[in-house]
Amino acid sequence: MKTNRQPRVVIIGGGTGLPVLLRGLKQYPVDITAIVTVADDGGSSGRLRNDLHIPPPGDIRNVLAALSDVEPLIEEMFQHRFTTSNELSGHSLGNLILAAMTSITGNFVHAIQEMSKVLNVRGKVLPAANQSVVLHAEMEDGTVVSGESKIPYSGKKIKKVFLTPKHIKPLPETISAIRKADLIIIGPGSLYTSILPNLLVPKLGAEVCRAKAKKVYICNLMTQAGETYNYSAADHVQAIYDHMSCAFINTILVNNEDIPSKVRERYNEEKSQPVVFDIDRLHELGLEVIPGEIVSLKDGAIRHDTKEVASMLYSILIDEKEKHLKK
């Protein structure tokens, strides 16, 4: 790592976890590239995807907003969701703008680049592929459920997930960012519907395996009904490895902060519980385990503490930089 440039960080994920992390990390002097899933097929994103034949813009929109450096009102407008009774109902303005920009430029990636300029985005936001992909899940009973939004509601245990079409091309910029990264961060996000859809893009996952950068996995704080019910932290890691051609994670961030019983009870009603961080099994998998108080409670919802996690990640980066200087 050269001392005269900002360290390069690649973050791979989607859903609600990725924007939370990015809001904290953008406060540090780092060069951020966020690689975002394009498997979403629900809600506003799914409707635009089907009607306009474009990749789903929702996860991209949330990441752009998280990395933006504009007046709060502009971000609020970009994230505004219409609640009318007509065709606009359920659409967010940002999704519609990204769809319009894709139509104008003829290219989803160009649309993201133009919106990044408008929103003064700190870093680069790249889709895992410049096309829509369909996520499928093969269940333990052999049945297959198609569609990212349908998978968690199948009522069955997931055996594996896979993408169609078979020929999906990652962006050259994505491959380049992974190769040049000083740190690669996986997660946080839904294991089967936000994390793996990125890593399963041909060549993209292989590049992550080959990359020289340290790879850090930020495991979810809570299990998810329909995806990771009763999964421990090591179960999350093992599921990733079962889908990949290599065991590539170097470090995992784990939570050692208690979650209030009232909050646990409410999550328990949704068949969600705190992820058990089985340290011994994580060590057996060859992972460095870094514990921390990384829980944030807001309106009764459990999220990663963006400031604390960002601080931990930046410390890892500084350690890596010092190691390279000593070589």
Image: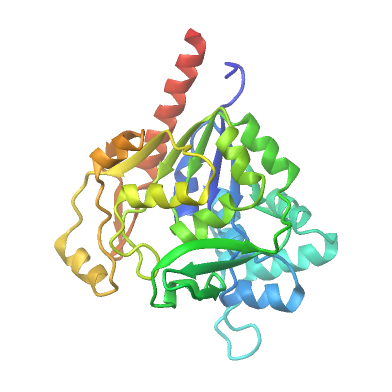
Q: Residue furthest front?
A: 142
**What x and y, as percent, mark residue 158?**
43, 66
Vertical arrangement, residue 232 with respect to residue 287, above or below: below
Residue at point 55% right, 32% down?
A: 30
Residue 70 appearing in the image: no
Viewer-proximal residue, 299 or 58? 58
Q: Residue furthest left?
A: 261
**What x and y, as percent, mark residue 192?**
47, 60
Displayed quadrant of residue 44? bottom right
Q: Quadrant of the N terminus?
A: top right
Residue at point 30% right, 53% down?
A: 296
Residue 246 appearing in the image: yes
Displayed quadrant of residue 173? top right
Displayed quadrant of residue 316? top left
Q: Is residue 307 left or right of residue 49?
A: left
Q: Is residue 248 left or right of residue 291?
A: right
Viewer-proximal residue, 19 or 120? 19
